[in-house]
Amino acid sequence: MQCIHCGHPVEAGAQFCSNCGYPVATPDGTTPPSPVAGAAAPTTDAPSAVSSGGFQPALLKTVGTSLAYGMAAALVVAILSAALLEAISPRISSLTDSLPYIIRQYVALKVSSIPFVSTVALLLAGGVSGTWTQAVLLDASYLGTLSTSATFHSPFTLVGMALLVGTAAGAYRSARRLGTRFLHGGVVGSVMVGLAAGLCHILLAGLFSFKVNGIQVGAATGRTFLMAFLIAAVGSFMGYLLAQYAPDSPNVLVSCWQWSHRLRGWVRTVADASMVYGVVFTIIGLAGFVGYVLSTGNC
């Protein structure tokens, strides 16, 4: 039997849900009366963070876990991407206009002249669909020092997807264990995770910006912060939501799948289509990238 309010499994004979404290329907279809004012609240196994929000230790733990999972996942993907780019760029014999300009410039500048940590920071910021900037200083003897700059908007990549899934997994695992309610702590926690992720991206992009051949490259921009905030907040939001309405799954991906199958009508159609198209286009994108490298780089 499951709670009609939050979906949490309820033991036979229990009058109240151990997760949210909501009265459980009896076999005759009625629900036990709610506690009267001044009476002792029903005893539950749920932590105190279930019925209260704010900046409590339990909420801060869920925020920290969600942020740590998301940033760790994004960093791992960014490091692997930087290593792959560093490995294949010296072997690419020809580049077409289908590649973004910033990538062509990166390869042309010789990856060996750019610190590896700067490459990771740049891919981390760009992966959330952030903005890269290039500033060039020109020394003209008769005009003085001239400067010019260019801005490039990066597409959403696997780094951003890793941040989204990571924050969702961390929020789901921690909120389910600590019993954080979605409407109380979940919304506040999602905003906190988004702000922290945005600040992390800005700090890393600013600390590891680089200059090569007179070109200053960085990604500490407002768009980078905003996109990191939105992606991390949405991921954490989904984790808190699934922890309350589908808490009986081993991880957030299984929980998302089970929750989508509990939906009905057009909502379920949209959820299933989004999952299928997401997987299909991710595979097509990876296959296309590998095929492009093999056809142009003699790798």
Image: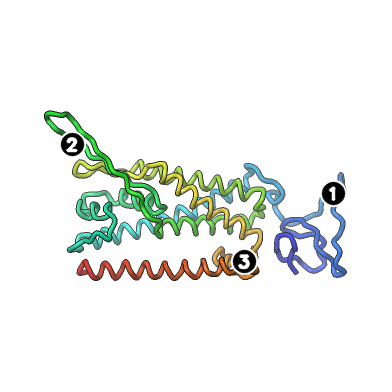
The residue tagged 3 is: 259
Label 2, label 3: how far apart the Cα atoms are: 58 Å
Of 157 and 73, the residue lying toward us: 157
**Mark 1 lies on residue:** 40
Horizontally, residue 144 falls left or right of residue 199, namely left
Q: Badge 3: how crowded within 10 Å, few (<14), some, or many (20+)?
A: some
Label number found at residue 138:
2
The quadrant of the rendering that contains the N terminus is: bottom right
Q: Residue at x 37, y 51 (%)?
A: 126
**Which three-letter amino acid code belongs to the residue tagged 3?**
Trp
Identify the element where label 2 is drawn: strand
**Residue 113 in the image: x percent, y percent?**
21, 49
Residue at the left extreme, as displayed = 141
The quadrant of the picture occupied by the C terminus is bottom left
Task: Please state which amino acid type lies under the numbered disc 1.
Answer: Ala
Q: Residue at x 31, y 57 (%)?
A: 82
Marker count (numbered): 3
Neighbour tally class for label 2: few under 14, some 14-19, many 20 plus, Cα within 10 Å: some
Foreground tag (2 vs 3): 2
The residue positioned 86% from the left and 64% from the top of the image is 30
Q: Badge 1, how many Cα within 10 Å: few under 14, some, many 20+?
A: few
